[in-house]
Image (tube, rainbow, N blue to C red):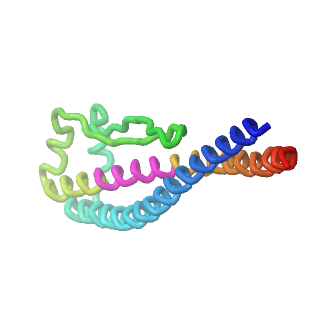
C-alpha cells in the first residue's frame, strides 16, 4: 500500500511540475503577444502612411495593378517548425525571403521609385510582425487547452488517491 501511495505522490509531483512549466511558458507568450500587438499597431500605421506617400508620388493612380502584374512568384515565405515544451509540441512560424531577381525592378520607374521601395520594405516588416503574432497566438491557444487538461488531471489525482491511500495506511 505504501508503494501505491509513493507512486501516486510521484505522479502528482510530475504532473504538478509539468503544469508549472507550461504556465510559465504561457505567461511568457502572453507578454510577447502584448508586445507584438503594440508593435503591429505601430508598423501598420507606418505602412499605411508609406502607401499614402507612394500614391501621392505616383500621382494618385493606384499602384496595386502594376505590382500584381509584375510579381511572378512569392519572395516572402513562411516555414513551420515545432518546439517541445514539457511534452507539448507548439508550432512556430518563421518567415524568410527567397533570393532571386527583383520583381519590382521597373515599378515606379517613371516617378516615385524610392517611395515604392521604402513602402515595400515597410510592408515586409509588417508581414514579419504578423507572422510572429500568428505564431504566438497559435501557441497561446494550444497551451491554454493543454494547461486546462493538465490542471484537471492534477486536481483529480490529488482529490482521489491520496486521501484513500492515506486513510488505508492509518
Return the x and y of residue 38 as percentages of the image width and height.
41, 67
- Indicate left or right for 147 with 40 as reference: right
Q: Which residues are magenta?
A: 124-137
* Image point (41%, 64%), residue name: 35
Which secondary structure is most common in the magenta stretch? helix
* Image point (43%, 60%), residue name: 32
* Image point (21%, 59%), residue name: 58
Instruction: Check residue 126 for magenta coloring.
Output: yes
Instruction: Check residue 133 for magenta coloring.
Output: yes
Foreground residue, 79 or 170?
Answer: 170
The image quarter containing residue 93 is top left
Return the x and y of residue 145 as percentages of the image width and height.
64, 47
From the viewer's perspective, is residue 126 above or below residue 1?
A: below
Foreground residue, 149 or 69?
Answer: 149
* Image point (27%, 44%), residue name: 66
Return the x and y of residue 157 as percentages of the image width and height.
75, 46
Foreground residue, 20 or 130?
Answer: 20
Question: Which quadrant of the figure contains the N terminus?
Answer: top right
- Indicate left or right for 118 with 65 as reference: left
The image quarter containing residue 5 is top right
Amino acid at each position: 500500500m505504501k508503494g501505491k501511495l509513493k507512486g501516486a505522490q510521484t505522479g502528482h509531483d510530475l504532473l504538478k511540475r509539468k503544469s508549472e512549466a507550461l504556465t510559465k511558458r504561457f505567461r511568457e507568450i502572453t507578454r510577447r503577444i502584448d508586445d507584438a500587438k503594440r508593435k503591429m499597431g505601430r508598423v501598420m500605421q507606418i505602412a499605411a502612411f508609406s502607401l499614402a506617400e507612394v500614391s501621392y508620388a505616383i500621382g494618385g493612380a493606384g499602384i496595386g495593378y502594376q505590382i500584381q502584374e509584375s510579381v511572378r512568384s512569392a519572395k516572402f515565405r513562411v516555414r513551420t517548425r515545432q518546439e517541445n515544451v514539457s511534452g507539448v509540441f507548439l508550432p512556430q512560424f518563421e518567415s524568410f525571403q527567397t533570393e532571386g531577381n527583383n520583381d519590382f525592378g521597373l515599378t515606379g520607374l517613371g516617378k516615385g521609385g524610392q517611395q515604392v521601395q521604402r513602402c515595400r520594405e515597410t510592408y515586409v516588416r509588417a508581414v514579419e510582425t504578423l507572422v510572429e503574432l500568428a505564431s504566438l497566438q497559435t501557441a497561446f491557444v494550444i497551451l491554454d487547452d493543454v494547461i486546462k487538461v493538465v490542471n484537471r488531471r492534477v486536481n483529480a489525482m490529488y482529490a482521489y488517491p491520496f486521501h484513500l491511500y492515506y486513510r488505508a495506511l492509518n
